[in-house]
């Protein structure tokens, strides 16, 4: 029982601790407890950004000691220093729209609730003309760094975070390599965008997919786990449909190539004539 109580106390203490991020944005030169703590009992000024400066770096040990002195002992941080940055008086609406469109292009199912953008240093205004550059790999996380390129070839760096949710698919059971992915072996879930190892898999009306390798149950499927489904294998018999104005003609042929949905492959009819045809289904093609 005593051991249980000790373990309970340690776990409770661990989860009661609150983490301080390495960078905190403030809206004035003065830094208050409320910049670190939500609704403090008594808000106090704890530091100030020096005149003419826009950032203040404080040792984490000093800041935690200051918080403890004011009755807040449950806070912690993984950073050696905490940097306070004064918010810049700029309108980031255009940049936020660029970030929104960037995520929409990667996640058709995403619902974006909020986007926060902060320059990595204080800037009084944005240039009149600039281009927003976002690393494509940023799409697998809800926060990151990007920069804008000015006409005079300068780069201004920003931090951003996005609050959003989207649809993902997880495996119901173990899936064998080359197995088709469908509603029988995948389950749909709505989750918050946090961090993925790659772009989550999404069904497409134009492409069918199969597992690239064996995948265990309860795994989030990403685009690195899948390849387009092979509907026709080289050497197999295929059903060919030829459509003209008056009738539909069907006959059998031999596939000379592997084919995925909408691929154009070469087939060979019974007279050994080679023909180009479009893959429309499992062992089915249509004359072009």
Image (spheres, rainbow, N blue to C red):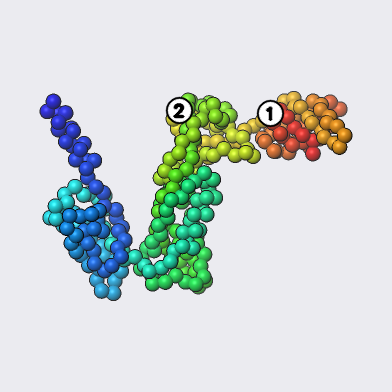
x%, y% of residue 166? 47, 43
Left or right, residue 282 beside residue 181: right
Q: Which residue is mark 2?
A: 217
The residue at which mark 1 appears reads as 282
Q: Secondary structure at mark 1?
A: loop
Front position in the image: 257 or 250: 250
Residue 33 visible: yes
Locate residue 23: give its quadrant. bottom left
Q: Is residue 274 left or right of residue 171?
A: right
Image position, residue 163 (x, y; %)? 41, 50
Q: Which label's residue is closer to the chain start, 1 or 2?
A: 2
- Image location of residue 188, percent across then percent down: 49, 34
Q: CA distance from mark 1 to mark 2?
A: 26 Å
Q: Quadrant of residue 205?
A: top right
The residue drawn where x is 52% and y is 36% is 225
Q: Is the residue under label 2 in contact with that under label 1 (CB below 8 Å)?
A: no
Which quarter of the image is occupied by the N terminus? top left
- Circle 2 — which element? loop
Residue at horizontal 14%, vertical 52%? 71
Left or right? Give the position of 209 relative to 53: right
Q: Residue at x 49, y 58 (%)?
A: 97
């Amino acid at each position: 029982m005593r051991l249980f109580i000790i373990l309970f106390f340690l776990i409770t203490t661990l989860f009661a601790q609150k983490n301080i991020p390495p960078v905190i944005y403030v809206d004035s030169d003065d830094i208050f407890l409320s910049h670190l703590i939500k609704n403090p009992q008594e808000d106090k000024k704890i530091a100030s950004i020096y005149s003419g400066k826009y950032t203040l770096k404080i040792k984490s040990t000093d800041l935690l000691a200051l918080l403890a002195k004011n009755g807040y002992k449950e806070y912690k941080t993984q950073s050696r220093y905490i940097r306070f940055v004064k918010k810049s008086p700029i309108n980031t609406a255009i940049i936020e729209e660029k970030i929104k469109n960037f995520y929409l292009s990667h996640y058709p199912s995403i619902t974006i609730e909020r986007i926060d953008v902060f320059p990595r240093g204080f800037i009084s205004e944005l240039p009149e003309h600039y281009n927003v550059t976002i690393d494509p790999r940023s799409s697998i996380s809800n926060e990151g760094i990007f920069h804008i390129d000015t006409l005079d070839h300068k780069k201004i760096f920003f931090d951003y975070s996005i609050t959003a949710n989207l649809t993902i698919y997880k495996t119901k059971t173990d899936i064998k390599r080359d197995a088709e992915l469908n509603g029988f072996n995948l389950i749909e879930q709505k989750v918050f965008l946090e961090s993925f190892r790659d772009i989550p898999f999404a069904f497409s009306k134009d492409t069918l997919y199969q597992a690239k390798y064996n995948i265990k149950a309860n795994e989030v499927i990403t685009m690195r786990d899948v390849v387009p489904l092979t509907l026709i294998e080289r050497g197999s018999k295929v059903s060919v449909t030829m459509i003209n104005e008056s009738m539909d003609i069907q006959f059998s042929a031999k596939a000379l190539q592997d084919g995925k949905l909408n691929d154009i492959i070469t087939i060979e009819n019974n007279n050994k004539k080679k023909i180009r045809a479009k893959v429309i289904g499992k062992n089915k093609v249509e004359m072009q």
